[in-house]
Image (spheres, rainbow, N blue to C red):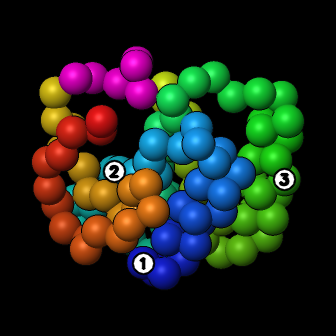
Amino acid sequence: MQAELQNIGRGIAAILQENFVGFYITGSFTMGAWNPQKSDLDFLVVVKYPLSILTKIALEQLHSQLALTDIGKRLEGGVLRSRDAPSEAVPYCCWYRTGRSVLPQLSVFALS
């Protein structure tokens, strides 16, 4: 599962390029309550500035490809500009952030 999520994060980062801040997995998966038979995979993508139309189209194409996979059918999330993120730390696990992997564990970290 970790490798699949990292590949999704890398795909998003490749589309967003310099606008990419991070790809965060949240919710039941990070809390140890994820059920592989019925749970979704909550995520948040953080960006520096608003998405262009071309970027949105590229992300929609990635989403369409992912929707054909088991993990892709479970993804549920959104995009947040870093300036709109809370300034205090948020209690979530980070699987992939700005090009580096982080071991899966429940932790508290700042988004910036």
| Badge number at residue 61 | 3
Q: Is residue 105 visible?
A: yes
Q: Residue 37 location, x and y as percent?
A: 49, 75
Please report the bounds of the magenta region as a residue range. Answer: 82-87
16 or 63, which lies in front? 16
Of callouts 3 and 2, which one flags the residue occurring earlier in the amino acid sequence?
Answer: 2
Q: Earlier in the sequence, mark 1 or mark 3?
A: 1
Q: Are marks 1 and 3 in contact (CB under 8 Å)?
A: no
Q: Which residue sits at x=31%, y=58%?
A: 94
Quadrant of the snapshot with the C terminus: top left
Q: Residues within 10 Å of mark 3 (few under 14, many from 20)?
A: few
Q: Residues within 10 Å of mark 1 (few under 14, many from 20)?
A: few
Q: Is residue 47 left or right of residue 67?
A: left
Residue located 78% across and 36% down the image? 56
User: What is the C-alpha distance between the residues marked 1 and 3?
Assistant: 22 Å
Percent coordinates x, y for residue 23 in the rendering:
46, 52
Residue holding disc 1: 2
Q: CA distance from mark 3 to mark 2?
A: 25 Å
Q: Residue at x 65, y 75 (%)?
A: 70
Residue drawn at 42 percent across, 78 percent down = 2
